[in-house]
Amino acid sequence: MRKSIILTALGAALVLAAPANAASVSPTTIAGNPSCEGGTKIDPVASGTYAVEGGTVTITVSGKSFDFTSTVLVTSVLVKGGPAANLYTYAAPGVTADSGLVSPDGKGLSHLCFF
């Protein structure tokens, strides 16, 4: 019985320590204002459904981060904020959802580019 209580408490601690809504890939930070050429720019950033090449992407903004779901495969997302951008790149063939994406400054979302 004592081992069960210890393991249960340890399991609860691990669940509480897990990061909530972390993006599934680590971003690469790019200085300046990279181009959205070849992608779909979303500006201003607000929760909603947007047309992208071949389908739609739905964005849910929560504070200074956002989640997305898409009807088409997304190969990368550029998240602009402050003096730089975070580029989230997904392994081929791409993904249809991710969560917890943020700008490099963590202060806000200037615009997004979906590729």
Image: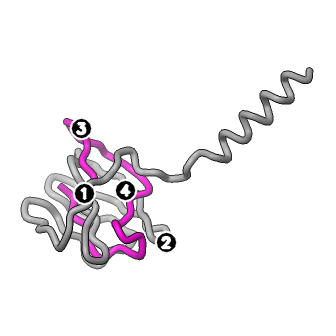
Q: Residue at x 28, y 49 (%)?
A: 71
Colouring mode (rainbow / by chain / secondary structure / one colour): one colour
- Looking at this view, name the residue that lies furthest to the right: 1
Q: Residues within 10 Å of mark 4 (few under 14, many from 20)?
A: some
Residue type beneath disc 2: Gly
N-terminal of the two: label 2 or label 4?
A: 2
Where residue 113 sits: x, y (%)? 21, 64
73 on left or right of 38: right
Residue 109 position in % (x across, y down): 35, 73
Element marked by disc 4: strand
Contact (Cβ within 8 Å) of mark 2 with mark 4: no
Q: Earlier in the sequence, mark 1 or mark 2?
A: 2
On whether residue 83 falls in the magenta region, the answer is no
Q: Which residues are magenta?
A: 88-115
Q: Position of residue 57 (x, y in %)?
A: 29, 58
Count residues near mark 3 (Cα–Cα under 10 Å), then give few for <14, some for 14-19, many for 20+.
Answer: few
The secondary element bearing badge 3 is classed as loop
Please tell me which of labels 2 and 3 falls first in the chain: 2
Q: Nearer the viewer, residue 46 or 90?
A: 90
- Which three-letter amino acid code belongs to the residue tagged 3? Ala
Residue kind at label 4, given as amino acid type: Phe
Label 4 sits on residue? 68
For marks 2 and 4, give the CA distance.
14 Å
Mark number displayed over residue 87: 1
- What residue does disc 3 label? 91
On screen, residue 75 versus residue 16, left or right, reads: left
Foreground mark, 1 or 4, reads: 1
Q: How far apart are labels 1 and 4 at the CA level?
A: 15 Å
